[in-house]
Each structure stands twice: as structure tokens, then as C-alpha cells.
Image (cartoon, coloured by chain):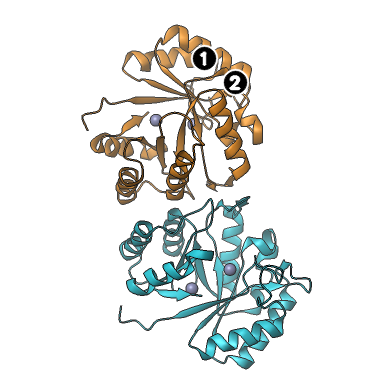
Chain colours: A orange, B cyan
Amino acid sequence: MGKPCIICVAITGSVPTKADNPAVPITVEEQVESTQEAFEAGASIAHCHVRMEDGTPTSDPGRFAQLKEGLEKHCPGMIIQFSTGGRSGAGAERGGMLPLRPDMASLTVGSNNFPTRVYENPPDLVAWLAGEMTKYDITPEIEAFDLSHIHQAVLMKHAGLLPGKLYVQFVMGVKNAMPADKDVFDYYVKTMQRLAPDAEWCAAGIGRNQIEVNEWCIAAGGHTRT
Amino acid sequence: MGKPCIICVAITGSVPTKADNPAVPITVEEQVESTQEAFEAGASIAHCHVRMEDGTPTSDPGRFAQLKEGLEKHCPGMIIQFSTGGRSGAGAERGGMLPLRPDMASLTVGSNNFPTRVYENPPDLVAWLAGEMTKYDITPEIEAFDLSHIHQAVLMKHAGLLPGKLYVQFVMGVKNAMPADKDVFDYYVKTMQRLAPDAEWCAAGIGRNQIEVNEWCIAAGGHTRT
Ligand SMILES: [Zn+2]
Ligand SMILES: [Zn+2]
Ligand SMILES: [Zn+2]
Ligand SMILES: [Zn+2]
């Protein structure tokens, strides 16, 4: 409300492959090119995943370094956010690219189910990733897959364990986690206003829920992700 | 409101030991004795965990059989609920006692963090446990450690995957999961009324939150757990 609308573009994600959609950018060159289009159209945050040559998700710091260099050159001023999500690696691997000091990095502070497995974010890994982000002065984007993740983020912020401004993204529409439900969305917004009125928040609808969740988000004054 | 107040007594739990509290009932005889006191005082559901001789939690069907026999003899008419929680075993072990056909069994339909680890309830294990409960005609008590677990339970109920009446327990006050927060409690109740108005619900506050959560629960018309 009155705040400038921040548009966050997710580069590639960790799931889709060229077989699903030949337009998915996989190489660093393709990723930089498609991000530049989004940047010129007004996107201000690039949420970055990287892939191996064969398209499998990876946390490889070398890939992230190349992508960061390309984005800094072609999208000057764009906020670069690296994913530390669990689809691209296990345990501390997930934070191996943080010494590259992106502006932001995603951080999930709890665990939940995914369509076919548990998305594991054990407390010691969460603490370690938050510590690395503190060390390298990286603002986390909290990926809230459930309500308790918002509470946990606020607790960690109050305990001085999260650097930068508190920034939460509600993730909705993942099978076996939180569905894209408008009443829950409204309660998430209300919870942010109650527990962390100065924080930023946004919402991402997964798959077929993307457009609907973006609309809720814009109407409620959050920023959006495409 | 207007419904009879159901009181649910948790026998022993899976965490405390004699070293923590010498009054914790560990042997089957001690468990039956302490449950009988609660039953005579008005408790109507016995939520049951069992232990080995040395006090470690177990899912051993033999132990559960002994406990069920003792409860049926000394607490006639009491509803017997077995725990399938993850502190007492891994994977399918957690449901090994279901062929004993207790009246109810606990079922967690999502994953979340516990104080020092991930509480893992992968989708295939959840589906298997729900299938066993269907096969043996056992009513699940859904242990909702987070908001999405309520949504998931309702989805499973609508899909015909949960036998009996829908029965949800909100679990609050576990470190790294959902805190005991009155606003969340109220939203949980509102969510039940919205998505499953005919279901039963109750709430359990863990540790120092127990009495407060019970008070919320009674005031809102749910049943309580001690
Ligand atoms: Zn965002
Ligand atoms: Zn991502
Ligand atoms: Zn209960
Ligand atoms: Zn239990």
C-alpha cells in the first residue's frame, strides 16, 4: 500500500527441465538473457537457481559465480538472491555459494512435506545457514511453507540470528504443504502485521496458483514473484 | 459449546524419564494404575505411549497389547488411543501395533521441526498409516503441529483416506514448531469451523504451556488433554 511494487523473478527454479518446457533457461547465458528481459520489464529481484550442463539442479558455487557476474553486467542494480533450497543439494552444500555475497539468499526455517518427500531443514542446518548469511552480510528471504515458519523467523529475528531487514515470502500451492487458500493468505498478512509490522513480505503461488497468488499479493500491498 | 467435555489423558509421553521425574509411570502396571486414577476422575481418552524396561520409548506391539489389556480391565469404556509418533520408532515400525485395533491412533499428516531434529512424516508413510487405520477400523487423531496439517487432514478426509469421524488435535508449544499463541489457536478453531464444521478438535500445550492451552480449549468448546 503506497510502497513501490517490487517484482521478483525466479530464474529457472529447481524443478522444470527442457523436456517439460523447451523455453526454460538452463545455461548461464540463457538465464542472464531471460533475466535481462524481466529486468527491463521492471523486475527488481532475481531469485536464482543454477543447473548442471545436463539440466540437473546443483548448488555449485562456480555456476552461481558465473550467473552473478552475468547479472551484474547485464542487469545493473538488480537485487541478486541465491536459492539455498534443498532440491539442489544436501546439508551444508546448500550454503556453499554464500561466500559469493549475493544481496539476498533464500532461507527456510522449518521443515514440511513436499509432493513425494520431506523437505528437511533441521534446526542445526538452519542455524548454520543463518550464521553464514550474517557473516557475509546477506539478507535472507524466509521461505514460509507453513504458518509456524513465520513465527520461527520472527523469533530468530528477535534473537539477533537473522541479518538485514526481515523479509518473508509465503509459498503456497505446493502439494502436501500449504495450499493456495485466500483465507490463509489473509491470515499470513495479518500475522506479519501483528508480529513484524516493519518487515517486508511477498507471496509465491506454485504452478497453476501463480497468477492468483500474485493478484492477492498486489491487492494486499506485498510484492510479487513471477 | 454444549458438547460434553472430553478429557484426554496422555500416558507417559515419549520424552520424560524417571530421571526427569520419578513419578512418571514407565511399566505397564504403573501406566494402568495412573490411567485408572485419571479415568475415575473423568478422563475419557487414554493417549498411549509405551516404554522398554530401561525407559526408552518403543513401538513394540507386545507392550501395547499388555497395556490395552490392562486398560480394558481397569478402565472399562475408556477410549484407547495408541501413539504412532516418531519418537518411538522409524518408518512402518510406527504402525506395527495397529493390528491390535485400538479405538483411535494418533496420525501426523505433515512434517515439521522438533527442538533438535526434523519430525519426519513422509507422504508415503502417512498414506500407509492411514491405510492401516482404515483396514483395522481405527479413528485417527490428527496431530496438527502446524496449520497446513489441518488442511492436509481435511483434504485426506474428503478423498476418503481417513476412517471414522475427523478428529484433530492442535499441538502447540513445541520448540521450532508452532508456539502456544492464542491468536493462532483462535485461527485454528476458525479453520476447523470453516473447513470441517462437523469434526472434533482439541488442543495440547506442551510442557509449561499445557494449562494455558487447556484453558483456551475449554473456553472455545474443544476437549482437553492432560
Ligand atoms: Zn520475493
Ligand atoms: Zn527457489
Ligand atoms: Zn485429545
Ligand atoms: Zn503422544
Q: Position of residue B101 (x, y in %)?
A: 61, 79
Residue extending farthest to the top is A73
Question: As drawn, is B142 to the left or to the right of B95?
Answer: left
Calculate the distance from the C-alpha at mark 1 to the C-alpha at mark 2: 12 Å
| Residue A111, above or below B146 | above
SS at mark 1 in the image:
helix
Q: Nearer the viewer, residue A71 or A123?
A: A123
Q: Dot 2 lies on which element? A: helix
Q: Which chain letter matches label 2? A: A
Q: Residue reaching furthest right?
A: B54
Q: Are marks 1 and 2 in contact (CB under 8 Å)?
A: no
Q: Which residue is mark 2?
A: A99
Q: Is residue B17 left or right of residue A111?
A: right
In the image, residue B184 sits, relative to residue B196, either above or below, namely above
- x and y, in percent, of residue A112 in the image: 53, 48
Q: Is residue A64 above or below residue B138?
A: above
Residue A193: which quarter of the image? top left
Q: Amino acid at mark 1?
A: Lys
Disc 1 packing (10 Å; few <14; some 14–19; many ≥20): many
Q: Position of residue A95 (x, y in %)?
A: 60, 29
Q: Are marks 1 and 2 on the same chain?
A: yes
Q: Which residue is mark 1?
A: A68
Q: Is residue B116 above or below residue A224?
A: below
- Asked whether mark 1 and ligand 2 are closer than 8 Å, the reply comes as no
**Nearer to me, A53 or A126:** A126
Of pointers 1 and 2, the one earlier in the residue sequence: 1
Q: Residue at x 66, y 72 (%)?
A: B21
Task: Give the residue type at disc 2.
Answer: Pro
- Which is in the foreground here, disc 1 or disc 2? 2
What is the crowding at mark 2: few (fewer than 14 residues within 10 Å), some, or many (at least 20)? some
Q: Is residue A192 visible?
A: yes
